[in-house]
Image: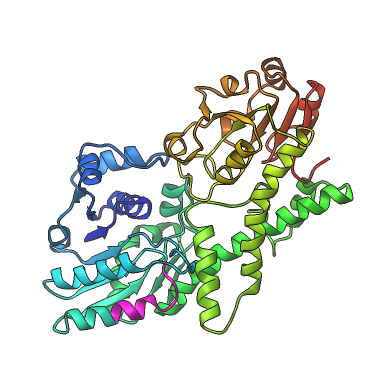
Amino acid sequence: MRVAMIGAGYVGLVSGACFAEFGVDVCVVDTEVSKVEALRAGRIPIYEPGLDRLVEENARDGRLSFTTDLAEAMEGADAVFLAVGTPSRRGDGHADLSYVFAAAEQVARAAKGPLVLVTKSTVPVGTGRKIQAILKKTRPDLEIDVASNPEFLREGNAIGDFMRPDRVVIGAESDRAFQVLRRLYRPLYLIETPIVQTGLETAELIKYAANAFLAVKITFINQMADLCEKAGADVHDVARGMGLDGRIGRKFLHAGPGYGGSCFPKDTLALARTAQELGAPVTIVEQTIAANDARKEAMADRVVAALGGSAAGKTVAVLGLTFKPETDDMRDAPSLVVVPRLVEAGAAIRTYDPQPGHARQMMPAGIHFAETALDAVEGADAVVLLTEWNEFRALSPDRLKAAMRGDVVLDLRNAWDPAAFREAGLTYQSIGRQ
């Protein structure tokens, strides 16, 4: 089989490389010439564990190619995937679908015969119908089937999620579309991956509903952490006790400084706006958005309070800037709120992140980017753990104590052992734990 993947961003590049690993002939097309040239040269524009090897091997074996020519990418394709960006639209929070609609029109103009156009991008319910209208208006002479095949890729574990997914969702209305997509995902039959076959609107909504539910779950445990602190309870044990209930599950019950990334912030906002327009508001999601925004601000206040109520003249070491480990993604990361607030409060910031590429461009001026965690901690009055990269888990409390000027440690990810840090003479604070 052959597919064209429009968009060499996170979703398009990972999906294209994984389909190629399945044995499919994949051509990834992107309008950014420098990105395509870099990919042809083996340079990956994003950090995702294992992706460089996957791209290199499949490109070498001739199953994966890159181009800026849409017609070239579509030549002989059984399906064309839309994997372009759908950022939040400035001003109202709706998903910006201009890239999706423009790509759909370009596909229609370039098509030489019947094909299946698949939306891989996260799009609001009803988008598939609008794409159908664009295709019909642009090429009434062609039969182009529209399908929705939402992605459920976690940054840092995207390849595993694609190769061993919990489920594959296919939304379509024609037998041909279902058959083409089932053939593409045939390698997953060996591990008995459930295939959820639905209509267009249902598939579109499954993606938003899943992300919104996980965002609600994160926000719930964060608020439980605040309650635990007031009540003298331990949120770690509360989460474990909850998670052992099979109806709830233990994932996404880890208290922290709030969610970020490429999906949850924009998808919850888009779902809330769409639901309002349709007259069926999802108020629990609206409250989740507000609570998550407030939590990031509260984390900065927590640091200032730990410094005795003033950060002026203090040096704060911030460990981790990306929104989660194993990614260089800074979109809606808590650090984008916490660090500027500390700078405004008069603190000098020393920071370290294993993947600082995007962070260097987005942090306030004057931030010192250290080469190691211990270098960042040198002379600090306080250490703040914002992203729980594995290398931070092994940091010795005694070595931290020896490198610091002060003794305040704020573990905003509950990644460290409180007893070990206190035994080292550090003033340790975590989230929802005593």
Tell me if residue 243 can be seen.
Answer: no
Which of the two residues, 114 or 270, is positioned nearer the viewer here?
270
Is 352 inside the magenta-drawn segment?
no
Q: What residue lies at 54% left-to-right and 63% top-to-bottom? A: 211
Please tell me which residue lies in front, 238 or 192: 238
Residue range corresponding to the magenta coloring? 123-132
Coloring applied to the structure: rainbow
- Which quarter of the figure has residue 147? bottom left
- Please determine whether, in this image, residue 416 is positioned above or below residue 92: above
The quadrant in which the N terminus is found is: bottom left
Res 85 → quadrant: bottom left
Predominant secondary structure in magenta?
Answer: helix
Q: How many numbered marks, from 0 up?
A: 0
Across and down, in percent, residue 399 comes to 68, 17
**Image side of residue 93 versus residue 68, left or right:** right
Relative vertical location of residue 355 with respect to residue 70 in this rendering, above or below: above
At 12% from the left and 58% from the top, the residue drawn is: 72
Q: Is residue 245 visible?
A: yes
Residue 153 position, x and y percent, is 45, 54
Spot the residue most to the top.
402
Q: Residue at x 37, y 54 (%)?
A: 11
Q: Return the x and y of residue 136 as percentages of the image width and height.
A: 22, 83
Q: Nearer the viewer, residue 388 or 240?
A: 388
Q: Name the residue at the right extreme.
A: 231
Residue 124 is a magenta residue: yes
Quadrant placement of the C terminus: top right
Residue 318, x across and y down, in percent: 61, 32
Q: Is residue 292 left or right of residue 203?
A: right
